[in-house]
Amino acid sequence: MAESIVTDLFFPIFLLAVVFLILKHFKSYFLSKSTLPLPPGPSPWPILGNILQIGEKPHISLANFAQSYGPLMSLRLGAQIMIVGSSPAAAEEILKANDRTLSARYVPHVAPAKSPELNYLSMGWALECNDAWKNLRTVCRSELFSSKAIESQACLREEKVGEMVRFLSVMEGKEVKVGEVVFATVFNILSNVLVSRDFIRLEEENVDGGMKALARKLLEVSATPNLSDFYPIFSALDLQGLNKKSKELVAKIFAVWEPSIEERRDQRRGDASSQKDFLDTLIDAAFTNDQINYLLMELFTAGTDTSTSTVEWAMAELIKNPESMKKVCEELTREINQHSLKESDLAQLPYLQACVKETLRLHPPAPLLLPHRAPDSCKLMNYTVPKDSQIVVNIWTIGRDPMIWEEPLKFKPERFLNATLDFKGNDFEFLPFGAGRRICPGIPMAAKQVPLILASLFRSFDWSLPHGNDPNELDMNEKFAVTLQKEQPLVLIPTIK
């Protein structure tokens, strides 16, 4: 693995630049070591730092390091310092006590827009919580994620989930890639909320219409170890071509809805009083096409990939744990009776909700959240965090900590039945959506659509593995690409109940 990473990072290139790197970065590293009380961490290699020790699953590597170096540690990735919090106390220090100081964003060089542009285009990747960022959050909170907005979207979610159920009924007895079907459903829910139309046809041979592949590829490119991040002197060169790939993928994604934006602008000029969706709201608020494109891309990629992964992981865990699946099905039979499933029924399904929470504990959508940045040097848990350090919280580690959770590696939804723990950012031992200023704004929507989809899948169908395979042998390996995906797509066979 180490050899492949070295090759990918063009090791020969920074051998040629070794003298310059030593003068510019390596010397400053020893200076910082002698003057700054950094958190403890693994010994870095010359020039490379700890790059090769991170590997392809950084959430696991960092969890292993935390066992030796404690809840707050530091690593050096080339010229970049990374500070990692791996306990509820560390998470609270970073995301609450020092939230105002550390709410700045560390933006990787692979980002398709330049940093100044991101400050008015992006919710997730704005460098700081500036006025443009606050405006975007306010618009999304009021128009998409408020209680009133979520309630008004209920019928739409129910309609699209109903279409999913009808499609799967036709697929009875056949192998189904669960992730593709769920992705298409969530994508169409969002596309109808945002621009009032479907972008994916469930009946297509490739069910998700290729959008899932584009979104996942963009996340994979973003998660690829990047020379430009480790050694900023290389950033203008884009030696690995990652920035170019990112821009190409973003252009393909934009092309999905760009015609709708222009068409809607023409319609608004003719009849601005017509019923409005989110796109109309943005146009009426004088958002530029660039602003709309980047905002829609963030909402689509964040909303679809995380929800899809959560449903896929939940289905896999329930297939592997038939007693839990039996309890889900019994609860659905007991509470829903014969009427069609409504979003309002979700409150009557505490065990299903507990299954969602347990899935989020074991398989958080973003195991390291999105990286924060220290705009200035500051103190954190009696250590100094140098200016411009990257700061991450390993919520994957926290969710599997045996000091917090009994039998932490076991899928045990019962642990949430009589617990007050929630995922709204107040319980630092359970932070699947983060906390503080940078908490995921889409929690209210995800909290509705994930259990609604799961409830519909288990109320309408029995599920089995192809070829009579043993559920105990189901591959549960993970793949890290900013979000935590199932390495092998879940393939199941539905049987109508």
Image (cartoon, rainbow, N blue to C red):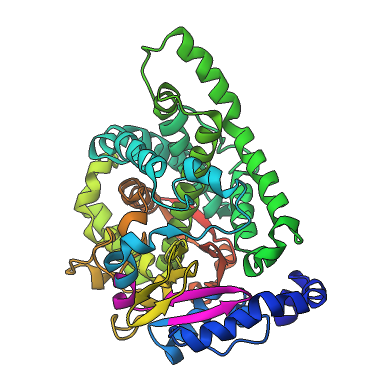
Residue 298 coordinates in the image, percent (x, y): 49, 45
Q: Is residue 261 above or below residue 75?
A: above
Q: Residue at x 71, y 56 (%)?
A: 236
| Foreground of the two, 145 or 374 | 374
Q: Residue at x 38, y 70 (%)?
A: 322
Q: Is residue 116 above or below residue 242?
A: above
Q: Residue at x 53, y 76 (%)?
A: 473
Q: Is 293 colored magenta in this rendering? A: no
| Foreground of the two, 223 or 81 | 81
Residue 58 coordinates in the image, percent (x, y): 54, 74
Residue 137 coordinates in the image, percent (x, y): 36, 42
* In the displayed structure image, the side of residue 356 where residue 52 appears, left or right: right
Q: Is residue 103 above or below residue 46?
A: above
* In the displayed structure image, the side of residue 411 where residue 301 appears, left or right: right
| Foreground of the two, 264 or 158 | 264
Q: Is 90 colored magenta in this rendering? A: yes
Residue 156 seen in render: yes
Q: Quadrant of residue 163?
A: top left
* In the displayed structure image, the side of residue 426 where residue 101 appears, left or right: right
Residue 117 coordinates in the image, percent (x, y): 55, 42
| Foreground of the two, 43 or 338 | 43
- Magenta span covers which residues? 73-92
Residue 356 seen in render: no
